[in-house]
Image: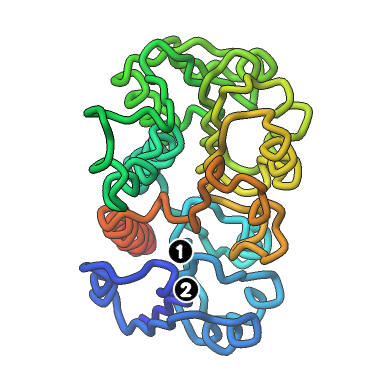
Amino acid sequence: MKLVFLDIKTIGKVPNMHLLDQFGEVTYYETTSPGQTLERVRDADVVITNKVVLDKIIIDQANKLKLICVAATGTNNIDKVAAGDHGIPVKNAIDYSSRSVAQCTFSILLHLLTNIPYYDEYVKQGSYSKSEIFTHFGKSFWELSGKKFGIIGLGNIGRQVAKIADAFGAEVVYYSASGQTITDTYKRLELDELLTTSDIVSIHAPLNEYTANLINYDCLRSMKKSSILINTGRGGIVNEADLARALNENLIAGAGIDVFEKEPIDFQNPLLHVINSEKLVLTPHITWASIEARTLLIEKIGHNIQEFLNESK
């Protein structure tokens, strides 16, 4: 059986990448451009892709293709209708990065909230050594305990974030974009109430018809001036130009963004030009990517292939 992994650079170095070799002859490509895709998948039985697009034109001409494995949860880069027309199953990976995203969500939040880099620099550049007192109050911060922590999207990741927020002593509430009550453990609020009452708003929802451009200028204007917005969900949920404007107008205290409408981020993205950059933390879509999460992702791809082979017997 011939397998092709089209974009292993998007997974990075993980200890078990060659776990997939047990299934046959695997060709690993660092990256694959649109012009290279057809040539590389034409003779493959199994194609593994993270972000490389497999559209109808590609799928129609990949005559030997029997299985598409997506090295991610989202499958919007696959024409699933075309795959279905050819009887080709599309298998994705789910719940491999929940702990990683949750951990990084709080890393970003605590960076914004506590401003450790400022205090670190205060000590290292000598100001503390010159101080008349044992401490320093240059940047105030507050505790998460007792604050309202609003979560948009209470799926696997959102629930993990909720557990950690609980441990900090925060009051967890959530908004369900689909309108469904996910759990009785936490109170479900409508979006308006969640935004106007929460001290932290943390986004962990997929990008779909319910969430596209969900957080715009009017939403940001309704939030507390002391609030912090975190988006480790999907780019496109937060209107980036509106967020930059809200930060420049001091409508909220800060924001942390790991995902963007266009990735890699465009040089002209307004978030790169916020006046007070200390109010904004930007990371390059990395919150999902702990070593453990990426290792588990490969395991889940292997499981999907083995499951397909078992079903084909």
- Determine whether the residue tagged by mark 1 lies in a helix, strand or loop: strand
Q: Amino acid at mark 2?
A: Val
Residue positioned most to the right: 218
Please, is residue 128 above or below residue 306 in the view? above
User: Mark 2–mark 1 contact, CB under 8 Å?
Assistant: yes
Residue at x 67%, y 38% (from the top left corner): 247
Q: Nearer the viewer, residue 73 or 281?
A: 281
Query: Can you identify the residue that label 1 sits on?
Result: 69
Question: In the picture, residue 279 is in which quadrant?
Answer: top right
**Image quadrant in which the C terminus is located:** bottom left
Percent across and percent down for residue 236 are 68, 47
Q: Nearer the viewer, residue 198 or 45?
A: 198
Query: Can you identify the residue that label 2 sits on?
Result: 47
Mark 2 or mark 1, earlier in chain? 2
Residue at x 43%, y 31% (from the top left corner): 139
Q: Amino acid at mark 1?
A: Cys
Question: In the picture, residue 88 is in which quadrant?
Answer: bottom right
